[in-house]
Image (tube, grey):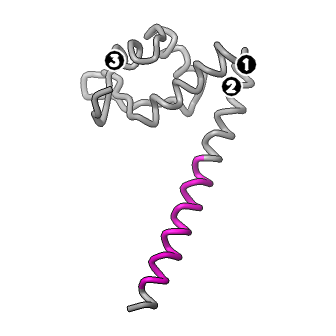
Amino acid sequence: MPSKQFYNIGEVSELLGVNPSAIRYWESQFSTLRPLKSVKGTRLYSMDDIEKIQYVKHLKSDCGYSSDGIRQRLRTYNTDNRRQVVQTLLRLRSLLMDLKDQL
């Protein structure tokens, strides 16, 4: 997959094997799926957005979750990601403090 900052709905659809209409429907159902929109109204998906859509597809297709179940899992997914970021930042801070002490 070429590395770009944003992808349009057609590219995301092709990449994940999901109809664009399904992606638009999921956006209306799950508030965490909110891609940026260009001035013309074109949806612009970041890698984070694509990962969330892939997660929704997995929960729906592979695990058989209902919309309510997916909403709950997305809340947990967002919390887990925040927790990982905070832990990484705390480790980085500790490392930087150790480096500062060594200087």
Q: Which residue is mark 3?
A: 11
Quadrant placement of the N terminus:
top left
Residue at the image point whose x is 53% and y is 24% from the top: 54
Residue 75 image position (x, y, % from top left): 66, 38
Q: From the viewer's perspective, tell me whether residue 69 is left or right of residue 32.
A: right
Residues at circles 1 and 2 in contact by the CB criterion of under 8 Å: yes
Per the rendered image, the range of residues in magenta is 81-99
Say which residue appears at 58% left-offset and 47% top-offset: 81
Q: Would you call the spot at circle 3 few (<14 residues within 10 Å), some (14-19), or many (20 or more)? A: few
Q: Residue at x 55, y 68 (%)?
A: 90
- Mark 2 Cα shell of 10 Å, populated few (<14), some (14-19), many (≥20): many
Q: Position of residue 37 (x, y in %)?
A: 34, 28
Which residue was labeled with disc 2?
Answer: 70
In the rendered structure, are the residues bearing label 1 and label 3 in contact, judged by CB atoms less than 8 Å apart?
no
Query: Label 1 to label 2, Cα distance in Å?
Result: 6 Å
Magenta segment main secondary structure: helix
In which image quadrant can residue 38 be found?
Answer: top left
Q: Is residue 33 left or right of residue 63?
A: left
Whichever of callouts 1 and 3 sits on the residue coming sooner in the sequence is: 3
Q: Residue furthest left?
A: 40
- Is residue 49 found inside the magenta-colored segment of the image? no
Mark 1, residues whose alpha carbon is within 10 Å: few (<14), some, or many (≥20)?
Answer: some
SS category of the residue bearing label 2: helix
Does the magenta portion include 91? yes
- Residue 3 falls in which quadrant of the image? top left
Residue 44 is labelled as: none
Identify the image quadrant of the C terminus.
bottom left
**Cα gap from disc 3 to disc 2, whole angstroms:** 23 Å
Q: Nearer the viewer, residue 95 or 12?
A: 95
- Residue corresponding to mark 1: 65
